[in-house]
Structures are given as structure tokens and as C-alpha cells.
Image: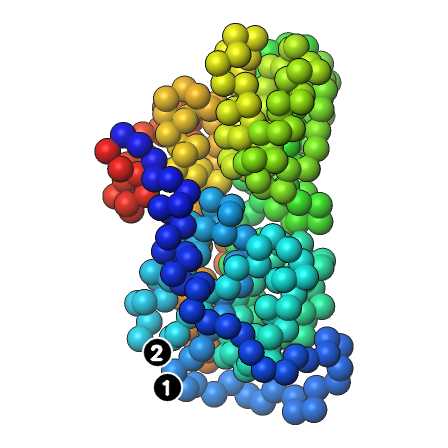
Amino acid sequence: MKILTRRQVMAGAAAAMAAVALSGCSITIGNPIANPPGPCQPQDHYRVAYIARAQVDSFAAWLANEMKDEAAKYPDVSLNVFDGQADDEVENRMIENAIANKYDAIIIQANNGEAQRPYIEASAKRGIVTITTNPEVEGIEGASSVDSNPYDQGAVVAREALDQIPPNAKVVVLDGPGGNYHSMQRRQAWQTEFFDKRPDVTVVAENIANWNKDEALRLMEDWSLANPQIDAIVSMNDNMATGALEAVKGKPAFENILSYGVDGTPEAAMLVQNGGMTATALQNATELAELNMKSVHELLSCEKNSLDVTIGNPLITKDNAGEFVDMYRNAGLVKN
């Protein structure tokens, strides 16, 4: 059995993104609205922009593919997917251009919620159906959300680690982007549910790796040289956890290192099944895509005025990882 390469997994996402260049005059965020939005009016066809955080992120690529597949089930919807490239300026410009190009709806996977906030607010104020997803950007009047609960995602894994990480252990921590709601909430969950309850555990190194596997690998290479004892990797997502594991692969001193993530990606599920990773929590991109497209269609067709939808976060351990690997195999994300 092998997992699809990132190039293979991302092929569909690249096709979804390649075709459409946003054009037209830009808007000035914060300007008064000349024509305030009127009441909701159903149409025969809707144009929806999905602005993804970054296609180099394995979970974001999976979600973009699932969004495209799910949109195909709605004949009255045209979905265009754009890559934010993990760059706030790029993502903000895409939101601004989607507003200027008068999309009926914009679904935004923020890179940094606070950096995108003024642009998301501008979209909602103009009466465009606006959804924030993975992560939700809270407190935006007129916007809806489809998301998981990031605190719960971190907490379910942290609680699993309570009795697994040995006494007086030394651990490293990998964080997502600064200002990212999911990163901050998952880290808070680890603090409350694990570190506050295990004062014997020492964090010997912690840094931001921006959800990125390669950045995590480089950090872990340095940390493993500086710290001959590292008992566990605590990561705010699977992508960084797997990068850190690659950095110490084959090194006898780290042969029994524990590792924890979030997302339940195909790679992580297989690692957990094979004993290479300890635990993770599933963030199901298929479910997120289904609920995003269902929600945007209900909002566009005036069935609902606003929505705040939350998905679950099941724990993946060696005992049940095979079920999730089978799920990915059936979805075509894992090949025999």
C-alpha cells in the first residue's frame, strides 16, 4: 500500500485553480457602500469563489479537491478555486478582486484571520454570501462559517497523550501560522489539557512551522542536534508532525519518539496504523466540502439567512487507524 504523492493529490486542485484569472478594477476596503444590499433573491445560476489558503499544504489541497467534486453536484453553481499561496497579501487581493468581479458568494479559508478580516467584512457588507472555513473568522456581521472546533481537535489528542508521554519527558512543539485561529486554539488546548496537568514535562524547543512539512523538518533537524533527548513531538497539524518525523528517521536516539498531530491526513493515518506516529484527530475535508457547498447553496437560494456549522473531530489511534485508511482508499487518496 502506498499513499499518493503530493503531486498526485494536488493534481485535481491545480486543475481547479488554473483557469480563472480574477480581473477588473479593485475596490477600496472600508469605503462606504453606494448601493446597500437588498433582500435575498434566488437566481438560476450562481458564481462562487473559493479562496484556499495554500495548495502546498496537504490538507488544504485535499479540501480544494473535495470542494471541486462537491460543487459538481450543484448544476446551478460554478465554483472557481484560487490559491492564496500562504501569503496574506495574495489572499487579500483575491478576496478584493472576487468582490470587484461580483461573485455571488465567496468562501474563504483564511491564512491569518485578522489579516483577512477587513476584506471578509467588505464582502459581507456588500451583500455577497460570505463563508469562512477552516478556520472560521469570528465576529464578522453578515458572514457564515463552516468549521471544526480547533480546541476540541487539540484537546482530544492532548488527553490521549496524558498517560502516554513518560514522566519527566522532554518534548518539542510545532505551531501553525501566528494569528491563525486553528493554530492558537489547538495550542491552547494542549496547554490546558496536557502541559498544565503535566508540569514534569519540559518543552525544550517550540517554533512556528506554518503548517509546512519542510519547515518542520528543518526545525527538527536543528532541535535533534541540540537536544539528545526528545521524547515526543507535539504538532498542531499532521503535515508538520510528519516533517519532524522524517528529520529523525533512522536515528537510534529517537527510535521510540512519540508524535501527535491534527487533521488525520492520509499520510498520518497510515503512519498511525503502522506505528510510526502516535495519534491524531480527523478533520474531514470531505465533510467540510459537503457542508460548505450545502451551506452556500442554502444561503444563495434564500433558504437560510446565516449558518454556523461545526464538524466532528474523532481521535485516530493505532486501534482504529485502519478504518480511516480504508476511507482514504475508497476516496482514491490511498493506493494499494
Residue under label 1, please give it: 44
Which residue is farthest top?
Answer: 252
Task: Please indicate whether residue 89 sits to the left or right of residue 334 in the image.
Answer: right
Q: Residues within 10 Å of mark 1 (few under 14, many from 20)?
A: few
Q: Is residue 321 above or below residue 329?
A: above
Q: Where does the N terminus fall, quadrant-wise?
A: top left
Q: Position of residue 318 (x, y in %)?
A: 39, 23
Which residue is farthest bottom?
Answer: 35
| Secondary structure at numbered mark 2 | loop
The residues bearing labels 1 and 2 have C-alpha atoms spaced at a distance of 6 Å
Q: Report the front residue among 242 and 195.
A: 242
Q: Residue at x 58, y 41 (%)?
A: 211
Task: Please indicate whether residue 272 sits to the left or right of residue 90 in the image.
Answer: left
Amino acid type, mark 1: Asp
Q: Is residue 273 above or below residue 74?
A: above
Q: Residue at x 54, y 16 (%)?
A: 257
- Marks 1 & 2, CB-CB < 8 Å contact: yes
Q: Residues within 10 Å of mark 2 (few under 14, many from 20)?
A: few
Q: Position of residue 52 (x, y in %)?
A: 52, 58
Q: Residue at x 70, y 86 (%)?
A: 33
Q: Position of residue 46 (x, y in %)?
A: 42, 79
- Can residue 189 be seen in the rendering of this structure? no
Q: Quadrant of residue 126?
A: bottom right
- Can residue 320 be seen in the rendering of this structure? yes
Q: Quadrant of residue 293?
A: bottom left
Compare marks 1 and 2 and give the one earlier in the sequence: 1
Residue under label 2, please give it: 76
Q: Is residue 143 above or below residue 10?
A: below
Q: Report the front residue among 142 and 216.
A: 216
Amino acid type, mark 2: Asp
